[in-house]
Amino acid sequence: MRQKLQHNDLHRAEPTSMMSRRAFSSGLLFSSLATSLVAHAQGSGPTLGQSAPDFSALDVAGKSHRLGDFKGKLVVLEWTNPGCPFVRKHYSGDAAGNMQTLQKEFTAKGVVWLALNSTEKASADYLAPAKLAGWMGEKMASPSAVLMDESGKIGQLYGAKTTPHMYIISPAGVLVYAGAIDSVPSARTDDIKTATNYVRQGLTESLAGRPISLAQSRAYGCSVKYKT
């Protein structure tokens, strides 16, 4: 099972040219890398230190949210997919899970936490809004909103390549962090306790008025299941 995760589910964001060379170097690898190549084809996303692209989306209850409405607050964007083992790693258990703990801790400090699902409707991983809301409820998650992006437009706008893929936006609307949730790229829950949590580190520094010491890292997880 672990071998399967490493070859089919684990995806670390790399430059498009590198992935293209690897994918075409062996016909045997093409099928397992196809989804990753689709994600890479969407572009690299916004530049750190520049304004985060604005967007609007409906949440799982049908309410519209616009990123620009949260200017003046720290915002976290979390790309999610409950069908991904790397996402399940960080949502393991109930309210004590890694992602749930982060959501609860930082929304209590005024941070806006937006979970986005860019899984296309044709994917086996797709959950309709009500089912996604139910899963979040079962996990006792507490993001500010869970947003639907079945078209993949928001994910492509940000260059989101994996689930999870994390972004932090400053109160001024500037992208100040992009990458992994932590430093250990695995689907093993036991690795959470030994990992450096980059999102907690970045939010803590930002709330203290300090620059983020690590503004970018390599995201890991399952490839976002974009519409093709």
Image: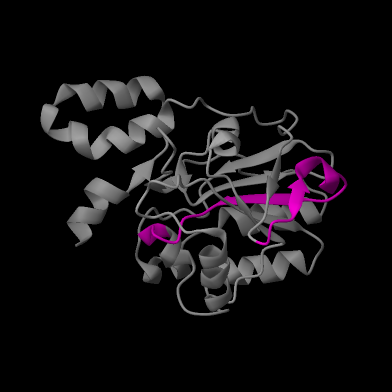
Determine the residue positioned at 53% across, 75% down: 139
Q: Identify whether 53 is placed above or below 147.
A: above
Determine the residue positioned at 52% across, 80% down: 94
Q: Identify whether 129 is placed above or below 17.
A: below
- Judged from this view, the residue extending furthest toward the right is 72
Query: What is the magenta range?
Result: 61-86
Q: Is residue 50 magenta?
A: no
Percent x, y of residue 10: 32, 48
Colour basis: one colour
Q: From this viewpoint, is residue 14 visible?
A: no
Q: Is residue 62 magenta?
A: yes
On screen, residue 24 versus residue 40, left or right, reads left
Count of all numbered marks drawn on residues in the image: 0
On screen, residue 221 versus residue 139, left or right, reads left
Percent x, y of residue 144: 72, 62
Quarter of the image containing the N terminus? bottom left
Front one among 75 and 118: 118
Determine the residue positioned at 83% across, 48% down: 70
Determine the residue positioned at 51% across, 41% down: 217
On screen, residue 53 versus residue 36, left or right, reads right
Name the image quarter holding residue 184: bottom left
Quarter of the image containing the C terminus? top left
Percent x, y of residue 190: 38, 71
Q: Identify whether 191 is placed above or below 67.
A: below
Percent x, y of residue 18: 33, 23
Q: From this viewpoint, is residue 131 visible?
A: yes
